[in-house]
Image: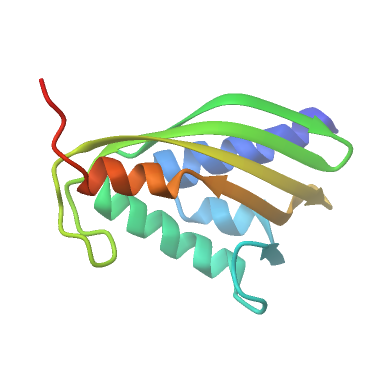
Amino acid sequence: MPDADVRIASDMIERAFNRGDLSAVDELLLPAAVDHQEAPGVNFPRHLKEVVVMLRTAFPDLHFEIRHIMSSGDIIAMHSVMTGTHLGPMRDLAPTRRSVHVRHMHFIRVEQGLGAELWHLWDTPGLMKQLTGPAPTA
C-alpha cells in the first residue's frame, strides 16, 4: 500500500497544483480531511481548492517539483520546491514579475486510501523576501 499512498501525494501535486485540476482534491482527500495549519473547523478540501486557485492566479507558470517522497505506515513525507513567476495578485500583493523558488515540507496521513490529515511547512519568509526584497542583480 505505500506505493499507492505515495501516489496520492504525487497525484495531488501534479494534478491540482501543476495542472489546476481541482477535481483531484475531491478524488484524493477525504471530505472530512484536516489541515493542521488551519483553524479548527475549516473545510480543508474547499480551502485547498482556494489555495490552488490563489497560487495559480498569482503564479500562472506555477510548478511544484517533488524532490523527496517516502512513506512509513500511514504517513507520507514529501519535500517539494515551488517555482513560478509572480504575474497575478496574491492576497494584497500586486504582481512583481519576480521569479520565486520556495521549499515545502508536507506530511500526509492516509486513511481508506485517501488523504486524511496534513501538516505542512513552507518557507513563507523566503517567499516574501523574494517578492518584496531588493530587486535581484544581474
**Rendering quarter of residue 138:** top left
Snapshot quadrant of residue 79? top right
State how the image is colored.
rainbow
Q: Position of residue 44 (x, y in %)?
A: 60, 67
Q: Residue furthest bottom?
A: 41
How many numbered discs, if any? 0
**Rendered residue at 43%/64% (across/down):** 50
Q: Position of residue 65 (x, y in %)?
A: 47, 28
Q: Nearer the viewer, residue 42 or 1?
A: 42
Q: Quadrant of the N terminus?
A: top right
Left or right of residue 133: residue 127: right
Residue 97 drawn at (x, y percent):
13, 42
- Residue 50 visible, this orientation: yes
The residue at the point 58 percent across, 38 percent down is: 11
Q: Tell me residue 89's x, y (percent).
A: 21, 59
Confirm whether residue 20 shows in the render: no
Q: Nearer the viewer, residue 21 or 72?
A: 72
Q: Is residue 96 left or right of residue 6?
A: left
Q: Is residue 80 above or below residue 39?
A: above
Q: Residue furthest front?
A: 134
In this view, the residue in front, 8 or 66, is 66
Q: Which residue appears at 18% of the width and 39% of the height?
A: 98
Q: Is residue 49 above or below residue 55?
A: below
The residue nearer to you, when weighing 85 against 14, is 85
Residue furthest to the top in view is: 138
Location of residue 15 with respect to 41 vertically, above or below: above
